[in-house]
Amino acid sequence: MSDNKVQIFDTTLRDGEQVPGCKLNTQQKLVIAERLDLLGVDIIEAGFPVSSPGDFTSVNEIAKIVKNATVCGLTRAVKNDIKVAAEALKYAKKPRIHTGIGTSDSHIKYKFNSTQDKVIERGIAAVKYAKSFVEDVEFYAEDAGRTDNEFLARVCEEMIKAGATVLNIPDTTGYCLPEEYGEKIKYLKENVNGIDKVTISCHCHNDLGLATANSIAGAINGARQIECTINGIGERAGNTALEEVVMIMKQHPYLHLNTDINSKLLYDTSLMVSESMGMMVQPNKAIVGANAFAHSSGIHQDGVIKNRETYEIIDPAEVGVTESAIVLTARSGRAALAYRAKKIGYELTKLQLDEVYKEFLNYADRKKEVVNDDIHEIMKTVSVETAV
Ligand code: KIV
Ligand code: ZN
């Protein structure tokens, strides 16, 4: 694997599915898992097998059908969770157990009523036990975002000694600033013995809208796995959006970070997840939102019609969107109207365009968007002949 490759760990079917009211059945999960494999994700976190019989079955069935990706199951640092996950993953070509425990002061005090040393002991025991089933064991230090760096480094070093192959540094509560999260990864790279033998993973939540920025800051500072979900779905304000981190790395080649994702499948995958979860994508969502490649103000439309690059940093075809949309509204200018009119068969002279534009503005003031049928109506009132 190249030093610059960032592995994409998709957790749509585990952390993503924790969205209230968005439960998927096994069949739906299988369809999504196949699509994620086709998309080129490196790891599919298929579920939390001990959490319910349904989740066990889903992980088990996904493990059977996934051809390329590693299939991963989540556990707590609890023996039975790990045993059940190993059983669920037994048919996977490349199985991974993802185990871990909270490491921040508040988790240690309120969740476990325990001490730092005891938490480390539980982590070591969990990693060692998981290792007795599979070679690939990922350890998560839950709430690492709010964990003291010195203690976190100790935790990481002990988990490497116990056999962990991947160290997940979750910003569970979405608290960190990008600089702070990037510094945390850098600190671990510089202060943990054996760190170069393992992969550091970013798992960032979006409570302050910083999940994507934090994940990229982590990768810039040496993390080589990003945990994310399609459309950024997940607990509370969600997880890092897969489509965002992938396109950031693609659009900024000087970062020298790359992935194996086939970006042309991003838009369709987003639709598939949104439909099966019954969870709409906000129209202004980066990369996959309905308005991500739509232009409605006159100034922007004029620019895009002359050359797409004036207002678009991504060619929509790169993410599987057929073309940019020029939306006709009261903010549109003559260029946009002439462009659309030509598309539906009307070649207008300058004089005709002036006349049609006046009537167009009357329509546009009454309606949110002027559509093709409206333009045909307008053409009748000003008696312009069709050019084609
Ligand atoms: O946000 C988090 O800390 C998690 C862990 C269980 C990996 O989802
Ligand atoms: Zn999470």
Image (cartoon, grey):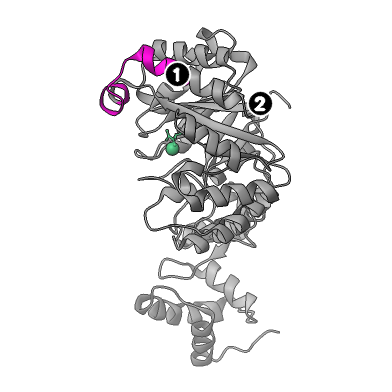
Tag 1: residue type? Lys
Count the numbered circles shown: 2
Give percent across and percent down for residue 106: 28, 24
- Image quadrant holding the C terminus, namely bottom right
Q: Which residues are magenta?
A: 107-123
Residue on which disc 1 sits:
184
Query: Magenta span has 230?
Result: no
Q: With 261 as the anchor, is 312 left or right in this view?
A: left
Who's the residue at 40% across and 40% down the image? Answer: 206
In the displayed structure, 204 sits above or below 13; it is above
Tell me the quarter of the picture where residue 112 sits: top left
Q: Secondary structure at mark 1?
A: helix
Give percent across and percent down for residue 210: 41, 36
Q: Secondary structure at mark 2?
A: loop
Give percent across and percent down for residue 338: 57, 73
In the displayed structure, 49 sits above or below 149; it is below
Numbered mark located on residue 135 in the image: 2
Q: Is residue 238 in view from this perspective?
A: yes
Q: Nearer the viewer, residue 253 or 370?
A: 253
- Image quadrant holding the N terminus, namely top right
Tag 2: residue type? Glu
Q: With 143 as the anchor, is 61 left or right in this view?
A: right
Q: Is residue 248 in view from this perspective?
A: no
